[in-house]
Every structure is written in structure tokens, then in C-alpha cells.
Image: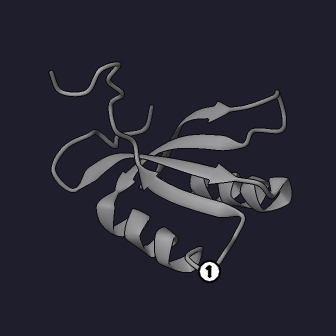
Amino acid sequence: MPWISSGPGTGRYIIRSTDASQLAQLIDSIQSNPRMALLEAIGPHGQPHTLVVMMAHEMAAMLEQRFRESNHITIEPDRPLSLFGDA
């Protein structure tokens, strides 16, 4: 994994897409950016639909703004799942 760690100012984000070509372009840009780390691609081999990416919060905000009007790509923080909530 690149030098990026989950510290202040960085976090894990989920990126989902219904447009395979747009997601492929985004994967290329993530892999060429040393400030972002593609942690996981989820979906069929060669056709992922969901990415887990470590990046600065500011970078995530810029991507969210860029794709805000898109019906094909959504970006949100990766949050831990809980079976029964905070009991």
C-alpha cells in the first residue's frame, strides 16, 4: 500500500458506479495519483462496480463535487457496519 495512512485528514471512501467506462477512467486516475490508494475493487473480475479508496478528505470532497450531478457515480465515507446498531 502507498504511504497514505488513515490519520487526521485522510479516510476510506466508497465509490460506486453504474457506468463501467466512467469507473475505469476513475480507477486509472486513482492509480496514477500518489495521494490516493485503491484498497479494493468489488465486483466481477475486470468489471468492478464499487471501489474502496484511501484519500484525503479534501480530495473526496472535490470528487464528490465533480460527480454530484452524475446519476452514475456516488462517493461516501466508508463506515463500519454494525448488526444491531450501537447497543
State the image quarter where residue 40 is shown: top right
Question: Could you tell me which secondary element the residue under label 1 belongs to?
Answer: loop
Query: How many numbered dots are placed on residues in this image?
Result: 1
| Quadrant in the picture for the N terminus | top left
Left or right for 57, reference 64: left
On the picture, is 40 further left or further right than 80? Answer: right
Please report the residue visible at 29 percent of the width from the left and 20 percent of the height from the top: 84
Whether residue 63 is visible to the viewer of this picture, yes or no, is yes
Quarter location, residue 42: top right
Point 81% across, 58% down: residue: 19
Residue 29 percent across, percent down from the top left: 64, 60
- Residue 62 x, y percent position in the rendering: 44, 74
- What sort of colour scheme is used for the picture? one colour
Name the residue carrying label 1.
69
Q: Position of residue 59 (x, y in %)?
A: 40, 66
In the image, what residue type sits under mark 1? Glu
* Residue 23 percent across, percent down from the top left: 73, 55
Quarter of the figure with residue 5: top left
Q: Is residue 76 left or right of residue 30?
A: left
Identify which residue is drawn at 15% across, 50% down. Answer: 8
Give neighbour class at mark 1: few <14, some 14-19, many 20+ (Cα, 10 Å): few
- Is residue 31 in sight in this rendering? no
Q: Which residue corresponds to the image point at 21% horizontal and 56% vertical from the top-left?
A: 9
Residue 67, relative to residue 29: is it above or below?
Answer: below
